[in-house]
Amino acid sequence: MKFVAQRVSAASLTVDKKPVSEIGRGLVVYFGVAAGDDEAQAEKCAEKLARLRIFEDGEGKMNLSVLDVGGEVLFVSQFTLYGDARKGNRPSFSGAERPERAQALYRYAAQKLAEQGVPVCLGVFGAHMTIEQVNDGPVTIIYEV
């Protein structure tokens, strides 16, 4: 399981030019599920996201979490995080989990994040999404469990 978290001042997600999700200050999280991943890993990712101290405090140090700043999370499933481009020019996605299982773990991780008090907005699993985000920093963290 892997995520890429980007600190934003705002972000929005549309599908077929129709608004689906929108957040203010917070994180855009691209979330990938590898073959064989499980609920324990999803819980670990949710805990890490809620407590990841990447927001600045009053002294300009990254000491605050999305919870501390009252931020939101736009949580987007992205199987392409498991794209392997080491051979040739077309990535292989054989390391990604099957869609049915990946969707269940994506929803489970989002639920666990919300249970910790973080407002979570979802993307549309398997859809072609358009995401606009205003990166803040920029700050980008990659985490794999």
Image: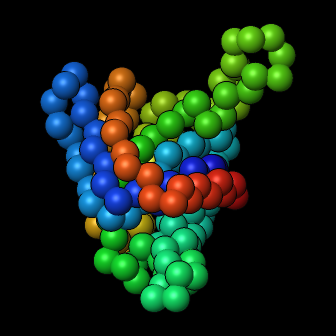
- Which quadrant of the figure has residue 61? bottom right
In the rendered structure, the answer to whether residue 90 lies left or right of residue 116 reads: right
Q: What colouring method underlies this structural image?
A: rainbow
Q: Position of residue 56 (x, y in %)?
A: 49, 78
Along the line of sight, the residue nearer the viewer: 22 or 33? 22
Residue 93's spot in the image, x, y percent?
Answer: 65, 24
Look at 63% across and 50% down and name the residue there.
1
- Residue under the image location 69 percent in, 12 percent down: 90
Q: Position of residue 23 (x, y in %)?
A: 26, 56
Count of numbered labels shown in the rendering: 0
Q: Look at the image and tell me in which quarter the C terminus lies.
A: bottom right
Query: Is residue 107 visible in the rendered structure shown here?
Result: no
Instruction: Give the vertical position of 10 relative to 116 (above or below).
Output: above
User: Above or below — where is 86 with respect to 27?
Assistant: above
Judge left or right: residue 60 versus residue 66: right
Question: As drawn, which residue projects farthest toward the bottom?
Answer: 58
Q: Is residue 74 above or below residue 94?
A: below
| Whether residue 123 can be seen here | yes
Residue placed at 34% from the left, 29% from the top?
A: 129
Q: Report whether 58 appears left or right of 79.
A: left
Residue 34, position as x, y percentages in the image: 65, 41
